[in-house]
Image: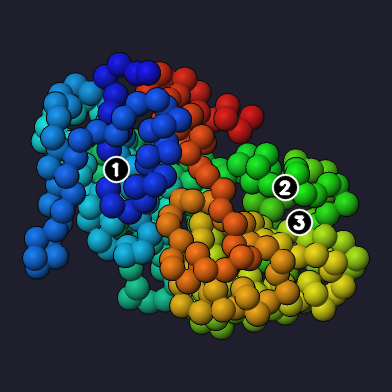
Amino acid sequence: MFKKVCLFAGNANPALATDIAAFLETPLGKCRVTRFSDGESFVEVNENVRGVDTFVIQPTGSPVNDNVMELLIMCDALRRASAGSITAVIPYYGYARQDRKVAPRTPITSKLVADLIQAAGVDRVVSVDLHAGQIQGFFNIPFDHLYALPVFLEDYLKQHFDESAVFVSPDSGGVERTRAYSKRLNASLAIIDKRRERANVSEVMHLIGDVRDRDCIIIDDMIDTAGTLAGAARALQANGARRIVACASHGVFSGPAVARIEESPLAEVVVSDSIPLPAAARGTTKIRRLSLARLLGEAIKRIHCSDSVSSLFA
């Protein structure tokens, strides 16, 4: 389909990379990603990429450190092979929650990862639904911040809900994201006031908005241990919500997440395929996945052809 373009994929999410390649009608580049017996990653590019626009598809989910190193090494290999340009397609940006100092003598690891990516020779970054939008400012190269909103709207929400539904932000930080969804369906908005005592532990305080006898859709960027999500669902149930579902761009599902979802009032949890589901999450009927292949494939096509990426969401 394209001239002088090549897609490469690490081991983080080969299924998504394959789907993107199928959408673009171009094969994945020949690349061998292996490990030495001591755990060191090794990458070998097995085709000529001199002067070629290259795209490395590698989310940095669990195991985060291994996947970050794979991404860096792949990009370094392409740079040393004289690739024309290197775009890192990172559907899920690991370390995104460490975007500021939360206490004295703590790191800003999001910035450190950004510095490493640029040092590896990356010319451009593409990511989906960053936990903190200001992470884009950590980069001195072009950054395309995509939103999974069109995927969730077209492939799920418009088929199951209408303007009588209520979109719910599980905390104050997600209000802007949730409002964008509610506007698309002309639906109402509610906010959960939450106080977090420590990392991965949250306590729901009270609900702002009317949800009684209405379908509720909780919108978030990621689900990690599902403490926030389960607490929000219980608060909605206590306030008379009829049916409760959740949509989140990234399904991390670590620790007790799946058990909490199973025990919660949630009828369904919908996530994208930005990162592979852990084994426990694949065994529950409450979790549904939607594909980002069309969204990312279209973005890659537009970047390569120097077309507008922002018009994807206009």
Label 1 Cα crowd, 10 Å radius (few <14 / some 14-19 / many 20+): many
Q: Position of residue 19 (x, y in %)?
A: 43, 38
The residue sitting at the right extreme is: 213
In the figure, residue 57 lies in which quadrant? top left
The residue mark sitting in front, 2 or 3, is 2
Residue 239 is left or right of residue 225, and the answer is: right
Label 3 Cα crowd, 10 Å radius (few <14 / some 14-19 / many 20+): many
- Above or below residue 51? Residue 247 is below
Q: Secondary structure at mark 1?
A: strand
Which label's residue is closer to the chain start, 2 or 3?
2
Q: Position of residue 307 (x, y in %)?
A: 47, 20
Looking at the rendered structure, which numbered label has been put on residue 157? 2
Inspect this view and state whether residue 35 appears: yes
The residue mark sitting in front, 1 or 3, is 1
To which residue does mark 3 refer?
A: 167
* Separation of marks 2 and 3 at Cα, in angstroms: 11 Å
- Above or below residue 226? Residue 122 is above
* Tag 2 near tag 3, CB within 8 Å: no
Residue type (three-letter) at the residue carrying disc 2: Leu
Tell which of 189 and 268 is nearer to you: 268
Looking at the rendered structure, which numbered label has been put on residue 214? none
Residue type (three-letter) at the residue carrying disc 1: Ala
* Separation of marks 2 and 1 at Cα, in angstroms: 30 Å
- Above or below residue 48? Residue 252 is below
Residue 300 is left or right of residue 46, and the answer is: right
Which label's residue is closer to the chain start, 1 or 3?
1
Residue type (three-letter) at the residue carrying disc 3: Phe
Q: Quadrant of the C terminus?
A: top right
To which residue does mark 1 refer?
A: 9
Q: Position of residue 150 (x, y in %)?
A: 63, 39
